[in-house]
Amino acid sequence: MSLKKFLTSKVFFKQVLLAVGAVVVISFIILRWLNFTTNHGEFKTVPELKGKSLSVASIELEEQDLILEIQDSANYNPDYPKFSVIDQEPKAGAKVKEDRKIYITVNPSGYRKITVPDLKDRTFRQAKPTLEALGFKVGKLTYIDNIAKDLVLKVQYKGSEIKQGAKLPKTTAIDLVLGNGNRPGSEAVSDSIPLNETDYNESASDLNF
């Protein structure tokens, strides 16, 4: 049988129809499988988790067939309870697929501790911005006799001197002991007023017995 006759024969058309039918059936099966595995057209709404405890957030996500994934804790935020959710991704109200991971950020139990810088022998003008840049606060200022005015002599917390390398929570108030510019043990001396000659003579006569 020649090629031309084969291409125009009923056998050829039957094979073409069978092939087309097979492609349609396979395509239909694949589409149905994809719809089943990806839940095509079905979405879950991400709930609002910020401010809620981990246990509550876990329950709410489980009800929506979503997965809780905890990220590293952020800096302590006093506006939220300890160990509560302070951020989430995706945001509340977003439409996502089932079993989607929802990443949350947890509020730690308190401010993280920071090493107190060595401020001794620095001026108050240098010490203040150094503390504030690290997140500390300048607490009580105490002045004692020392010829170096406004020089930091001691760094204290709750009445005790802070040792070098010690760590305290961020926002802690650090007390400073500063020099007042006076020599230790010295007393304030008033300006002398010169006496005139008459006063001098009267004063001298009072010394004669």
Image: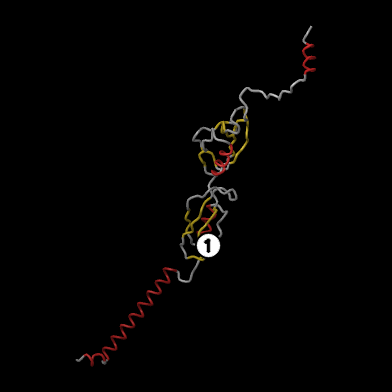
Please state which of residues 79 and 19 is positioned toward the viewer in this rendering. Answer: 79
Compared to residue 203, the image places residue 188 above or below, namely below
* Residue carrying label 1: 46
Q: Is residue 4 left or right of residue 30?
A: left
Image position, residue 101 (x, y; %): 46, 59
Image quadrant for the N terminus?
A: bottom left
The total number of labels drawn is 1
Please state which of residues 113 and 97 is positioned toward the viewer in this rendering. Answer: 113
Q: Which amino acid does the dot numbered 1 rest on?
A: Val
In terms of secondary structure, where does tag 1 sit? Answer: loop
Q: Is residue 136 left or right of residue 12?
A: right
- Residue under the point 23% across and 90% down: 6
Compared to residue 37, the image places residue 204 above or below, namely above
- Residue under the point 64% across and 23% down: 186
Image quadrant for the C terminus?
A: top right
Image position, residue 43 (x, y; %): 50, 67
Compared to residue 162, the image places residue 54 above or below, namely below
